[in-house]
Image: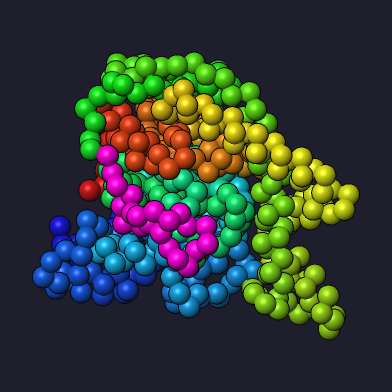
Amino acid sequence: MKARAAVEGALARIEALEAEIGALLDVDEEGARTLADKLDREPAPRGPLHGVPFALKANLCWRGHLTGAASRILDGYRPPYSATAIERLIAAGAIPLAITNMDEFAFGSSGENSSFGATRNPWDLSRTAGGSSSGSAAAVAAGFVPFALGSDTGGSARQPAALCGVSGFKPSYGRISRRGLIAFAPSLDTVGVLGDSIERIEQVLACVSGHDERDATSLALPPLALEAPREHLRGLRIGVPKEWDAELCDQGARDRIRAALEAMHALGAELVSVSLPLTLHANATYQVVSACEAASQLARYDGVRYGSRESCDGTLQGMIAQTRGSSFGPESRRRILLGTALTSDEGSPSYEHAARVRRRIVDELRAIFERVDLLASATAPEVAFRLGERSGDSARMHHSDLLAVPASLAGLPAASVPCGTCTTDGVELPVGLQLCGAPRADARVLSTARCFQAATRHHLARAPLTGALP
């Protein structure tokens, strides 16, 4: 397909469906058409993504375009450079089309914390698309684009991918450059990829991965070398953690995960029951570590160095207080206050304890990969819940990330792949299978997910909202 035709098809779907979904914050129609025409005139493809439109999360810098992390405090910010991942995609022939909605500064698991309204799930508009990469997941599920960039700090690409019935991937920490990603928690943040298939994600990873000398956390590795397609999983030992067992999940999700495990066994994988008791503390550890890092990172948005500025009583402190108080959303203020308290003289022992627990969780996870090749579990313990259902209940909201957080704490690669749907309140909703690998085993995770996908074909299911459209 010609690049211009691909762009026009994407814009037509956006025109038809975006008003109902709320996945996008900005669409660059003119820029996408101009680049598409330029690509169509080139004598040879630039790369495997030549002419493919994509969307990017609002916390990834895109030169000259509004990049505000869905926060009022960054209203009007247009970065003077593009994130490395975006630069590399454009070099490979991909066409940036739109900026996607998200939880403000990636603080959330439902997409409801955006300053511009919640994203709705294409499978059921009354339900969440997950978070914080809600718009990226919904944009792929609605067929706006074949893939979208997100970010994954504690499950923010994988969980919405699962809830929207698309594929999602969190790379090993440092595998994709973080340059140009607006920080939430730098020791956890990764650029994530969401796509209509694992093959699509592999194409993207091959283009955007590789060392970046402008990012001190970038691994000194070449671009990801993909494994050959697998026809079976014989020879693979897949660990099924007791602590991540399907019993944690809702009944419908539980049945789908058990069926997925049986399918991998039928493909030849050996399923091994393993125990990871320290990961039971992963969510609490994550909340402490991420809040402390978030409070530190967001200190820069004070109306002086970055961000908008509010009028006040004429004093510097008054201006800062007014700016931060009115421009940050409730969830951002909650996390800033929590992180500030935990890094105070009185609270610092809590952070130090969380850092020690994190180290032990990392050691436990890395040790288990001496016994197994991969870990398998549900991506999220439930299907998409209703918008507003968990507002004001942080404990229930954090429950959504329960199974995704351990890989983030340890910097491990992890993929979510569709594994079927279940009926909830009369609505068919998707379920995701998570596969997690050892450090730098990104290619192994993806090849296994691709084999499962090819054998089951669950990724071909489409949200009812988009079924009637081409």
Q: Residue at x 46, y 22 (%)?
A: 371
Residue 374 visible in rendering? yes
Residue 170 position within the rendered picture, expressed as x and y whole percent measured from the top left? 45, 45
Residue 350 position within the rendered picture, expressed as x and y whole percent measured from the top left? 80, 43
- 11 relative to 158 in the view: left or right: left
In the rendered image, the residue lying farthest to the bottom is 314
In the rendered image, the residue lying farthest to the left is 43
| The image quarter in which residue 365 lies | top right
**Relative to the observer, which residue lies in front, 345 or 31?**
345
Residue 145 position within the rendered picture, expressed as x and y whole percent measured from the top left? 32, 54
- 131 relative to 282 in the view: left or right: left
Residue 456 position within the rendered picture, expressed as x and y whole percent measured from the top left? 28, 26
> Image height check: is 100 above or below 326?
above
Q: What segment is highlighted magenta in the picture?
A: 206-227
- 273 relative to 30 in the view: left or right: right
- 9 relative to 314 in the view: left or right: left
> Image height check: is 350 above or below 297?
above
**Relative to the observer, which residue lies in front, 129 or 45?**
45
| The image quarter in which residue 315 lies | bottom right
23 inside magenta stretch: no
